[in-house]
């Protein structure tokens, strides 16, 4: 299209909804950049041109034709024609038809396989769902494409994939079942995986919960560790190559790029200047030295994948890195934005783990994938991947994003080539994505009342942001650049915008936040931040919660108070924190929902009590102690539709039918405890179709009970402990293809009871603690082909028994505490090359443990005395190394001082060999410390820094904390602490740094905090903190550093900070600070650093900063500052660092910025062109300029 010719309206419509090719879109995009007339036309384009907006107005449902085979056949034919094949006809044999023709039809035969339907196709071939004719087994069959059958390199690569997949056998890697060639057609048969890949999940659900994301990568790392153990490097790990099955198991896909680590370079696929992998997830050395990559490149890719699952996008996915080459260069040269900066609820320890996985140098990453998996383990608590897959299955994925298992099996040709030179004379063009954004709405600018949804932002070629209005008592209208939501009950209005920007502007793909411009007292959004992704649809639900004064008390509070009255305890969520509550006084004052209820022994529950549980909309976990299991209880439980975990410690059982529990679609874990649990109960339990985990404790289950559990094909975990099993016939469980964990601890099982252990091909974890087995049993256990973890505590296992286990090739965790194994077994233990964790007991000396650690460098060797029973903290006094080992055993991350430098340690193997001091200990989320644990902390000789997340700050805990006189830095997050307790911290004479974050932070806490006379640096993060709290903090004249984030502070309270004459840093990111509030900041003459990122500050506010003569750093990212405001900053000649990313600064500010010759660092946004940035750099040669300019 000529530059001076305007596109037709129909072409603009097609551009608006992404129906034109990339080249045409590029042309239209360039034209729109200079043509205001077309911008106006585009803004006025009829919304009905977009089928998504039209669909929002209509009620959709299933078509009556959806189930007809003719429709499926037609769709397959259309798919084939799209690929370039429009020849009609029916072929009956794969021998005389092409692969492309075959994609239209089912029922074709390939050797022993009957092809049922096409699953996907790509450059390397097609993947079919197929059935083995004789075995009647459903598999996925990958067939090499026709045009590659004469390509020797392609066939060699296909053969390489066959060998790679065939070489491994692990629950977390897709298993190969067959491979061969029929009539010149090469094929590979693999297990058929029913589920979704992780890229689909992220598109459907957005970023994952922290525990789910960590569990996904932990499982993937376990599979990759097995591949590495077999000499294979994957080289293309990414979300789309990780499959999540419906039962919550992660499968690694696509070994098509895998290379044998010891393979001859002459035999390798990688040629000079050829890069194998995917740019978003590729390790630096993979692009630079593709032939020399080792297993640590996969760890980097897993780190990128974890980053994407946590943040919704990979590390370098912004507009600055808009081509493969730029991404590869960034992986090599640029540090990624830390996870914790993109997602504030990520614990610092987890952010550090991601940073370590993404280290530029392989030597600085985790040494092995199992190390990575172990580091993630503490953050997986509460993960429920089966539920995650189920939720995703119920969520429609946006059109254009239809990747699945078969697609990725077929498209194994992920190759990015970097040629040494261009021989065709063409210039390389960096592709960029279209980014014109307009505010459009159902009914455009009219008043919107009672509508189901409002389209808030539409990003052409990318996606749609939808705000759904919940309730008929809410009205909404678009006014200027805001969406106004009005509560018709009390007349209060809320103004929403996206990142506080104008509505009609260029907005690239990426992460954004909806902001509430005025104080939100009742408005509730289910998500404040979101990601704009191509062809995506992001839905944000808005509702208004009215004050409870004079209104009925919320049901969660009523039920919670009743449970506590009965002596039970609950766990609740306020949206900001998860809290354990055992008294009425501990209930949050704000709204909450109850997700766990536990009744103590001998509680008399009425029918009304049981019925009330069904009213808790988010109750997922119920625990009864000493209860009678009767029909009434079963019926009541069956009405808690969202229940996932149920524990019944039964005094007696009077019902003979618990199948009503099948009405609970999410019930997954059932624990039965007590002498009333017998084989009859096992028979009843076997009729539950949704439960995947069964635990029976202190029961009367006999050997025969296993035959009942064998009728539960979905079972994944079976735990029968403290029960009278003796010689169970394990072979009856052989048909349970999903059974991965079998726990028989503290039963009477003898060697003969394990005769048929080899018939359990999928069991990965076998627990035999406290059984009567001898060394003879290991002849049977060693034949369990999938066994990875074996626990043998309190058994009579000897050194001879270990010899018999040598054939268990996948064994990665072995627990020998309180057995008869001693240091003479070192040579045998060293032979277990796949071990990643080994626990030994008191028969091993410290010297022998050190030898084991040296000879098993990839194994975490733990020395646990028998009397400890897993708790190394029983000793009253420990040296620095013992403190470190104890803390790491507890899952902590350490700050160590080694020769006057600070180092991080997260596993025993990373502790320095020489002297060191434990300066800081960071405990993760949901971690409980006993009194003995605190004794060890109190006696730690060098400890001065403690970090807790989700700690219950009780009187007991505070009593221990104040007994640590050397404590200087204390960080407490995500708790709901009564304000009067914090003043006890005054007893810490050296406490100078205090951080408190989460729901606990509000104005009432400030009363206690201001009594802490020694605190010099204070960080508070919480939405309940207002300017009223600042008036209280203004009495802390000693403060030098104050950080207030995510607070409802507009700045008016800073008038009370006049006494803070020592204040040199004020951090106000993500607060409501406005221009008027900055007037009070102008008096802080010692201020050197002021952070106003994502506040409501504009040009007028900058005028008040001109008197800050010592200001060295000013951050204004995401504010309303424009070109006009810059002149107010010129008098601040002390300014060295200025951040203007995400502001309204454009090329027109070039002349003004040129006067800032005193700057050392300047960060600019996308509104400045590349030419302007280059010109500015020439004007400021001593300034480092960073820019996300538009190309």
Image (spheres, rainbow, N blue to C red):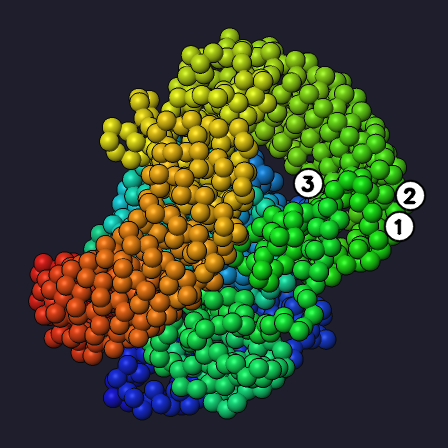
Horizontal and vertical percent position of residue 331: 30, 50
Q: CA distance from mark 2 to mark 1?
A: 8 Å
Between 227 and 358, the residue placed more toward the observer is 358
Spot the residue most to the top: 824
Specify whether residue 48 is in view: no
**The N terminus - image quarter:** bottom left
The dot on residue 631 is 1
Horizontal and vertical percent position of residue 255: 47, 44
Question: In front: mark 2 or mark 3?
Answer: 2
Sequence-wise, the earlier of marks 2 and 1 is 1
Residue 101: quarter of image: bottom right
The residue under label 2 is 654
Between 154 and 1050, the residue placed more toward the observer is 1050
Q: Is 242 left or right of 804, judged from the image as shown? A: left
The residue under label 3 is 716
Q: Given contact means CB atoms under 8 Å apart, are the residues at marks 2 and 1 in contact?
A: yes
Horizontal and vertical percent position of residue 367: 38, 33
Residue 271: quarter of image: top left
Helix, strand or loop at label 2? It is loop
In the rendered image, the vertical position of residue 662 relative to residue 178, given as above or below: below
Helix, strand or loop at label 3? It is loop
Sequence-wise, the earlier of marks 2 and 3 is 2
């Amino acid at each position: 299209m000529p530059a001076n010719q305007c596109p037709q309206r129909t072409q603009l419509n097609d551009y608006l909804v992404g129906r034109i090719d990339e080249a045409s879109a590029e042309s239209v995009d360039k034209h729109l950049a200079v043509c205001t007339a077309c911008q106006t036309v585009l803004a006025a384009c009829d919304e009905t041109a977009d089928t998504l907006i039209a669909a929002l107005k209509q009620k959709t449902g299933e078509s009556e034709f959806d189930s007809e085979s003719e429709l499926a056949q037609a769709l397959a034919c259309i798919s084939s024609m799209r690929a370039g094949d429009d020849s009609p006809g029916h072929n009956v044999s794969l021998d005389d038809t092409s692969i492309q023709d075959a994609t239209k039809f089912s029922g074709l035969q390939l050797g022993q396989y009957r092809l049922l339907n096409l699953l996907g196709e790509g450059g390397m071939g097609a993947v079919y769902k197929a059935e083995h004719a004789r075995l009647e087994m459903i598999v996925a069959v990958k067939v090499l494409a026709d045009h590659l059958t004469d390509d020797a390199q392609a066939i060699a690569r296909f053969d390489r994939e066959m060998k790679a997949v065939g070489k491994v056998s692990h629950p977390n890697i897709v298993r190969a079942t067959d491979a061969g060639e029929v009539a010149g057609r090469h094929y590979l048969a693999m297990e058929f995986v029913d589920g979704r890949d992780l890229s689909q999940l992220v598109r459907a659900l957005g970023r994952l919960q922290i525990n789910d994301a960590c569990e996904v990568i932990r499982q993937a790392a376990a599979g990759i560790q097995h591949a590495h153990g077999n000499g294979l490097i994957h080289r293309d790990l990414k979300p789309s190559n990780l499959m999540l099955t419906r039962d919550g198991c992660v499968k690694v896909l696509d070994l098509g790029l895998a290379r044998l680590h010891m393979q001859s370079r002459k035999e390798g696929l990688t040629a000079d200047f050829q890069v194998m992998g995917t740019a978003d997830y590729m390790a630096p050395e993979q692009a630079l030295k593709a032939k020399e990559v080792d297993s640590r490149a996969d760890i980097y890719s897993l780190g990128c994948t974890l980053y994407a699952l946590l943040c919704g996008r990979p590390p370098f996915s912004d507009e600055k890195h808009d081509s493969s080459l730029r991404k590869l260069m960034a992986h090599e040269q640029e540090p990624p934005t830390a996870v914790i900066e993109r997602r504030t609820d990520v614990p610092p320890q987890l952010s550090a783990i991601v940073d370590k996985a993404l280290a530029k140098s392989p030597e600085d990453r985790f040494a092995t994938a199992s190390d990575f998996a172990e580091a993630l383990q503490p953050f997986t608590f509460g993960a429920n991947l089966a539920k995650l897959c189920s939720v995703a299955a119920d969520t429609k994925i946006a059109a254009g994003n239809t990747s699945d298992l078969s697609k990725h099996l077929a498209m194994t040709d992920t190759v990015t080539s970097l040629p040494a030179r261009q021989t065709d004379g063409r210039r390389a063009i960096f592709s960029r994505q279209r980014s014109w954004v307009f505010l459009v709405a159902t009914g455009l600018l009219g008043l919107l009342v009672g509508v189901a949804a409002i389209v808030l932002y539409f990003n052409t070629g990318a996606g749609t942001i939808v705000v759904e209005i919940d309730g008929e008592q809410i009205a909404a209208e678009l006014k200027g650049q805001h969406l106004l939501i009005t509560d018709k009950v009390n007349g209060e209005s809320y103004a929403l915008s996206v990142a506080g920007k104008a509505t009609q502007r260029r907005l690239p793909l990426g992460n954004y936040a909806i902001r509430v411009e005025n104080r939100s007292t009742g408005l509730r959004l289910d998500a404040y931040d979101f990601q704009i992704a191509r062809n995506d649809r992001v839905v944000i639900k808005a509702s208004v919660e009215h004050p409870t004064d004079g209104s009925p008390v919320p049901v969660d509070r009523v039920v919670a108070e009743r449970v506590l009255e009965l002596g039970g305890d609950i766990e609740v969520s306020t949206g900001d924190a998860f809290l354990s509550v055992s008294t009425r006084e501990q209930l949050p004052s704000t709204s909450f929902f109850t997700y766990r209820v536990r009744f103590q022994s001998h509680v008399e529950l009425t029918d009304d009590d049981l019925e009330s549980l069904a009213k808790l909309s988010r109750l997922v976990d119920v625990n009864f102690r000493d209860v009678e299991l009767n029909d009434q209880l079963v019926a009541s439980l069956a009405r808690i539709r969202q229940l996932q975990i149920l524990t019944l410690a039964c005094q007696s059982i009077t019902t003979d039918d618990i199948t009503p529990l099948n009405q609970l679609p999410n019930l997954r874990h059932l624990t039965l405890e007590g002498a009333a649990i017998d084989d009859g109960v096992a028979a009843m339990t076997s009729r539950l179709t949704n439960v995947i985990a069964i635990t029976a404790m202190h029961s009367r289950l006999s050997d025969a009970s296993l035959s009942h559990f064998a009728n539960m094909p979905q079972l994944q975990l079976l735990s029968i402990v403290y029960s009278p099993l003796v010689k169970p016939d394990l072979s009856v469980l052989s048909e349970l293809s999903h059974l991965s964990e079998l726990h028989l601890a503290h039963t009477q099982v003898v060697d003969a009871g394990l005769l048929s252990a080899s018939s359990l091909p999928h069991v990965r974890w076998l627990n035999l603690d406290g059984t009567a087995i001898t060394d003879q049993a290991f002849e049977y256990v060693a034949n369990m082909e999938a066994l990875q973890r074996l626990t043998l505590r309190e058994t009579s296992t000897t050194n001879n028994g270990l010899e018999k286990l040598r054939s268990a090739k996948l064994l990665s965790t072995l627990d020998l505490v309180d057995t008869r194994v001693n240091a003479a077994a070192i040579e045998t233990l060293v032979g277990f090359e796949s071990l990643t964790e080994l626990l030994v007991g008191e028969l091993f000396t410290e010297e022998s443990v050190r030898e084991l650690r040296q000879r098993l460098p990839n194994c975490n060797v733990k020395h646990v005395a028998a009397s400890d029973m897993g708790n190394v903290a029983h000793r009253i006094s420990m040296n620095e190394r013992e403190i470190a080992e104890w803390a790491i055993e507890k899952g902590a991350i350490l700050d160590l001082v080694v020769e006057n430098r600070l180092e991080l340690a997260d596993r025993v193997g990373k502790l320095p060999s020489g002297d060191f001091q434990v300066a800081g200990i960071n405990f993760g989320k949901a971690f409980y410390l006993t009194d003995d644990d605190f004794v060890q902390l109190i006696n730690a000789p060098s400890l001065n820094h403690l970090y807790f997340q989700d700690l219950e700050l009780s009187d007991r805990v505070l009593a221990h904390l104040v007994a640590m006189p050397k404590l200087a830095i204390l960080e407490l997050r995500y708790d709901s602490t009564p304000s009067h307790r914090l003043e006890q911290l005054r007893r810490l004479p050296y406490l100078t740094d205090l951080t408190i974050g989460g729901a606990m932070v509000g104005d009432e806490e400030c009363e206690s905090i201001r009594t802490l006379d020694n605190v010099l640096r204070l960080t508070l993060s919480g939405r309940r903190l207002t300017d009223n709290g600042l008036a209280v903090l203004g009495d802390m004249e000693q403060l030098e550093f104050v950080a207030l984030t995510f607070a409802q502070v507009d700045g008016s309270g800073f008038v009370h900070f006049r006494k803070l004459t020592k204040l040199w840093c004020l951090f106000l990111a993500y607060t409501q600070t406005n221009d008027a509030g900055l007037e009070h900041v102008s008096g802080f003459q010692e201020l050197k650093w002021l952070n106003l990122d994502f506040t409501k500050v504009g040009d007028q506010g900058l005028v008040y900063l001109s008197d800050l003569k010592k200001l060295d750093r000013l951050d204004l990212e995401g504010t309303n500052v424009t070109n006009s405001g810059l002149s107010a900053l010129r008098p601040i000649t002390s300014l060295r660092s200025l951040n203007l990313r995400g502001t309204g600064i454009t090329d027109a500010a070039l002349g003004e910025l040129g006067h800032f010759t005193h700057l050392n660092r300047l960060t600019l946004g996308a509104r400045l062109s590349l030419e302007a940035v280059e010109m500015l750099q020439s004007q400021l040669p001593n300034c480092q300029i960073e820019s996300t300019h538009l190309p």
